[in-house]
Amino acid sequence: MRIAKSVFVRQGSNTTYGTVAIALSFFVFAYSSRFGQASILLYYALWFPLVLIDYRSSLGSYQKQLWLYAFGVFTCLSIFWSAVPSVTARAAIQYTTHIFCALVAMRTLDIRTLTRGAIAGTAIVLLYSILFGYYAYDPIDGTYSFVGAFDSKNQLGFYASLGIYFAFAAVFVLGERRIWLVGGGIAGLLSAYCLLASASATSVLTTALIVMLCVSLRVILFLSPRQRKRLFAAVAISGVILAVAGVYLGAVDLILGLFGKDSTLTGRTYLWQQGIAAAQLNPFFGVGYQAYWVQGFSEPERLWEEFFIGSRAGFHFHNTYIETAVETGLVGVFLLASILLTAFVGHINRFLRDDRNDESYVLLGVATLLLIRSFVEIDILNPYHVGSFLFYFTAGKLSMRARVPKADPLVSYDRMEFAPPANWEPRTGR
């Protein structure tokens, strides 16, 4: 029996395979540290074979995707000046192949398949955490919080944020009904429970902001592309003014106080100071990709002790740009930030320009979520992480031509939303 290639690689025809592949990938990203190398091999087995099935559909034009590999290639080059070349070599290869898998997924999956897979994946991840998770004591703020099957409540909160967002997008943006309406509701409820149980201020605030953004964008859809741009510019400028005013008037401290946090963000401001000081020692190229948090080095050992990290692993500066500057210098910061800003601005442009673009509508929310979290987390900097996978998937879609939705056959010809039949002629008689 022969199986058509389209079942695996053609957008719209590979919904079943793509949904399962995304769901399993999410599970691997969440718990690869628990299940080891076998889970990573499963992740590669989901995406690499698609190149052998149909390399044209899976790879596309690499000339349009070279910019997406810029930071990954630079991490590989950092092997030559790394403080620990063996660690950098392994991590850089993992990160670059992770980019490759994300771009294969980007080429072969449409936005509906990604959303369904994300709903199923987050539901499985969170259900596993509920069944096998635990509460952990935070010695910094002196509280207990639910961390699930993770080592950090922020990671549990991130998956919960993704679950709520993709459930919202499936129903209110893509118009899912029947089984996926029910699935989105279940995933949304699981995510809401885990989000509250984790008590992650970062995740709660970013989730609220992203959902509010998507609701606001829904209103903009009723306007013409030209009117959208004007309204979006006005709202963006007003938002920046209000944000700056809120900082000076103490609104930030008030919001943090609702979550039991202070202005130091539970020690993060001190951690940022230490990171900036470390980055200044090697300002342009850094110490090498993932070559800073290495056991035996005096500075990371000191920080692990100060922040009560007994495992001496899995810690970072809680800021993507500071962490990147320490490891890959200002050059690395420029390359990574350029991709992130391109993804954000590019999908804004497509959403405002096109009459209706559900793909950019959904991916703009993902890009915004990653952009906001980049100031307090490092979601896009590590291999085998759901944040970096979605990051390159989102940015990579800009290298493809925007998919125009099918025309509504009930729309009149004078709207010019689709071409009339070749033999059609206007009436000229009385």
Image (tube, rainbow, N blue to C red):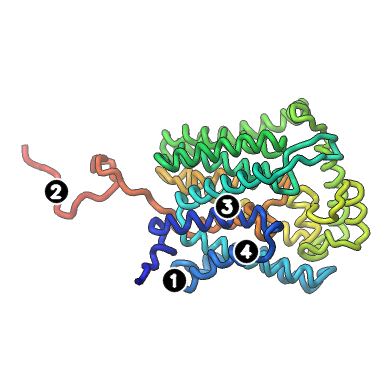
**Upstream in the sequence, badge 2 or badge 3?**
3
Residue wearing tag 1: 54
Residue occupying image coordinates x 82% and y 39%: 137
Give the SS element for disc 1: loop
Which quadrant is the N terminus positioned in? Answer: bottom left
x then y, percent, for residue 72? 66, 65
**Upstream in the sequence, badge 1 or badge 2?**
1
Give the alpha-carbon distance from disc 2 to disc 3, as whole Å.
44 Å
Give the SS element for disc 4: helix
Contact between marks 1 and 3 (CB within 8 A): the answer is: no
Give the SS element for disc 3: helix
Task: Specify whether 96 is left or right of 20.
Answer: right
Is residue 334 visible in this depiction of the protein? no
Give the alpha-carbon distance from disc 2 to disc 4, as whole Å.
54 Å
**Upstream in the sequence, badge 2 or badge 4?**
4
Kind of residue at badge 1: Asp
Q: Classify mark 3: residues with Cα within 10 Å, few (<14), some (14-19) or many (20+).
A: many
Give the alpha-carbon distance from disc 1 to disc 4, as whole Å.
19 Å
Give the alpha-carbon distance from disc 1 to disc 2, as whole Å.
43 Å
**Upstream in the sequence, badge 4 or badge 3?**
4
Contact between marks 2 and 4 (CB within 8 A): the answer is: no
Kind of residue at badge 2: Glu
Kind of residue at badge 4: His
Which quadrant is the C terminus positioned in? Answer: top left
Number of marks in the image? 4
Residue wearing tag 2: 425
Residue depth check, mark 4 versus mark 3: number of the one nearer the observer: 4
Residue wearing tag 3: 343
Residue wearing tag 4: 98
